[in-house]
């Protein structure tokens, strides 16, 4: 198992999000909520311990959302980490509502985006959100209306930087014509590369790409390849999946999430794994 030290997170290098430079291995704070990303975690102290360990490990990019819980993830971050380290960037989201465990509903209406922003500011104890992400385009609301509200909030000083999640290439291009986009978050992992086109556009425009579900495994054949590479590095399959993402593109900013300190440390150790050309060829 690769060593985990407080400097391990720096081994993956850095990436620039807007005007902020962050280490290229972040933390996704979805899993510090209850089952189905609903309600409070069974052990709130354990969730707070994870958040404290995040900053101890030098991770300085945390991804969250108003819908995680809902409101639980942001509340725990604000209660546990405020006042924040000077270099910490918190990226939160608006655009999804909840009706129960594992139930998500798009809502990109301007009035919802504005109300969600006010709630996030309060829970995170911020005067301005560091990075505000549209969680998912709402098919019932023009993208220009949802993003336009974020631009208005930015002009009012309540949002610093604007980002997107779960978009295709056409939507990204449309958004870029409205306002600068500082990051894109789509599902992407070693087994699911459907967003390769979006990643390529991000690379060409120097936009960080945040892959969610970063440790996906995939087919038996691919799983066997990952296991073989993991054995060579004395690592876990999840660590190899994260290391592959870091090697895949210089704009990649993985945000693996967990509610366990031990698992967090294992994920962070992936930044110290250097995959060889042989490894990468085997993984495809």
Image (cartoon, grey):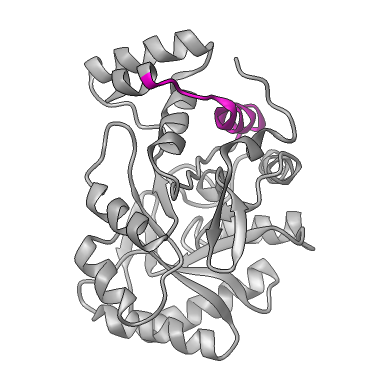
- Residue at the spot 33% in from the left edge and 75% down from the top edge: 176
Q: In this view, does 55 lie above or below 117?
A: above
Q: In this view, does 58 lie above or below 72?
A: above
Instruction: Between residue 113 and residue 177, name the one nearer to us.
Output: 177
Figure quadrant of the C terminus? top left
- Residue at the spot 30% in from the left edge and 12% down from the top edge: 224
- Residue at the spot 61% in from the left edge and 64% down from the top edge: 20
Figure quadrant of the N terminus? top right
Side of 172 relative to 98 (left or right): left
Side of 157 relative to 206 (left or right): right
Instruction: Between residue 89 and residue 124, name the one nearer to us.
Output: 89
* Majority SS type along the magenta span: helix
Q: In this view, does 73 lie above or below 121?
A: above
Which of the 4 image quarters holds residue 25?
top right
Give the percent coordinates (x, y) of residue 208.
44, 56
Residue 202 among those drawn in magenta: no
Side of 246 relative to 226 (left or right): right
Q: In this view, does 172 lie above or below 208?
A: below
Which of the 4 image quarters holds residue 111?
bottom left
Give the percent coordinates (x, y) of residue 276.
43, 20
- Residue at the spot 66% in from the left edge and 55% down from the top edge: 76
Give the percent coordinates (x, y) of residue 94.
44, 69
What is the magenta range?
Answer: 260-277
Instruction: Between residue 101 and residue 79, name the one nearer to us.
Output: 79
Give the percent coordinates (x, y) of residue 268.
60, 33
Total marks placed: 0
Residue 274 among those drawn in magenta: yes
């Amino acid at each position: 198992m690769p060593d985990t030290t407080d400097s391990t997170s720096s081994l993956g290098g850095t990436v620039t999000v807007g005007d902020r430079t962050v280490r290229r291995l972040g933390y996704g704070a979805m899993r510090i909520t209850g089952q189905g990303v609903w309600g409070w975690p069974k052990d709130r102290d354990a969730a707070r311990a994870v958040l404290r360990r995040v900053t101890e490990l030098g991770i300085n990019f945390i991804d969250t959302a108003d819908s995680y819980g809902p409101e639980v993830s942001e509340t725990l971050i604000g209660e546990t980490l405020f006042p924040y380290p000077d270099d910490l960037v918190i990226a939160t989201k608006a655009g999804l509502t909840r009706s129960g465990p594992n139930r998500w509903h798009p809502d990109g209406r301007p009035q919802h985006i504005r109300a969600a922003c006010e709630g996030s500011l309060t829970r995170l104890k911020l005067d301005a959100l560091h990075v505000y992400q549209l969680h998912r385009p709402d098919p019932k609301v023009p993208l220009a209306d949802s993003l336009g509200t974020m631009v208005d909030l930015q002009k009012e000083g309540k949002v610093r930087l604007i980002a997107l999640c779960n978009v295709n290439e056409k939507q990204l291009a449309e958004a870029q014509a409205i306002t600068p986009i500082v990051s894109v978050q789509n599902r992407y992992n070693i087994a699911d590369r459907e967003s390769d086109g979006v990643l390529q556009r991000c690379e060409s425009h120097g936009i960080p790409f945040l892959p969610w579900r970063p440790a996906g495994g995939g087919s038996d054949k691919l799983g066997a390849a990952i296991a073989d590479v993991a054995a060579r590095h004395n690592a876990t399959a999840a660590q190899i999946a994260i290391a592959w993402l870091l090697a895949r593109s210089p704009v990649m900013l993985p945000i693996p999430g967990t509610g366990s300190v031990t698992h967090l440390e294992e994920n962070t150790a992936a930044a110290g794994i250097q995959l060889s050309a042989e490894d990468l060829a085997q993984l495809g």
